[in-house]
Amino acid sequence: MNGLRDLLISFIVQDTKVYQNNVGRLEELEASRSTLLSQLDAVTAREEKLHEEARNLERTMALLQHEVKEATRKAEIELEAKKNMENSLQDLKRKYEEEQNKRSRETTSNQITHDKISLLEKQVSLDFQLLLNHVHCALVHFYKLYDKFLSLIPSSWPK
C-alpha cells in the first residue's frame, strides 16, 4: 500500500509541477497577450493618425490646386492684359514714328505736330509705366502663392 501511496504522491507532485509550469506559462502568455494588445492599440492609433494626416494633406493639396488654378487664371488674364498693352504700345510707337515722319515733311505745321508728339510720348510713358506695374503685380502675386505653397509642403518631403 505504501508503494501505491508513494506512486500517487509522485503523480500528484508531478501533476502539481505540471500545473505550476502551466500556470507559469499561462501567466507568460497572458503578459505576452497584454503586450501584443498594447502594441496593437498603438499601431491602430498611429494608423488612424496617419489616415487623418493623409486626409488633411489631400484637403490641403486640393486647396492648393484650386489656388494654383486661380493664380494661373489670373496670370493668364494679366498676360492677356500685358499683350494688349504691348500691342497698344506697338501701335503708339507706330503712330509716334508716323508722326515723326510727318513732322519732318510738314514744316509749316511744326507746332501742331510737336504738340501731338509730346502727347504721344506722355501716353507711351504712361502706358509703359502701367505695363510695368501690371507685370510687377503679377510677379508679386505669383511669388506670394509660391511661398505659400512651399510653406505647406511638409519638411520631410524632398524638394
Image (cartoon, grey):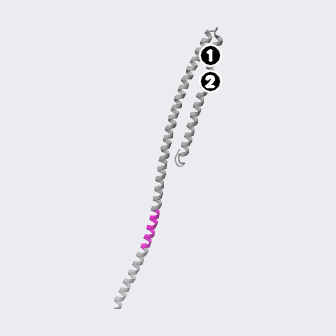
| 45 in relation to 64, above or below | below
Q: Nearer the viewer, residue 51 or 123?
A: 123
**The quadrant where residue 119 appears:** top right
Q: Residue 150 in the image: state x and y as whole percent.
A: 55, 43
| Distance between the alpha carbons at the discs numbered 2 and 1 | 14 Å
The 10 Å Cα crowd at callout 1, few under 14, some 14 to 19, many 20 or more, is some
Is residue 83 shown left or right of residue 121?
A: left
Q: Residue 60 in the image: state x and y as whole percent.
A: 50, 46
| 4 in relation to 72, above or below | below
Dominant secondary structure, magenta = helix
Indicate yes or no whether the magenta region holds residue 134: no
Q: Residue 83 in the image: state x and y as whole percent.
A: 53, 26
Indicate yes or no whether the magenta region holds residue 27: yes
| 61 in relation to 46, above or below | above
For marks 2 and 1 on the same chain, the one whose residue lies earlier in the sequence: 1
- Residue visible at 62% across and 17% down in the picture: 117
In the picture of the structure, the residue carrying the numbered disc 2 is 125
Is residue 5 shown left or right of residue 90?
A: left
Which residue is most to the top?
108
Q: Nearer the viewer, residue 153 or 5?
A: 153
In the picture of the structure, the residue carrying the numbered disc 1 is 116
- Residue visible at 55% across and 42% down in the picture: 148
Check disc 2 and give the amino acid type.
Answer: Ser
Q: Quadrant of the N terminus?
A: bottom left
- Residue visible at 42% across and 78% down in the picture: 20
The 10 Å Cα crowd at callout 2, few under 14, some 14 to 19, many 20 or more, is few
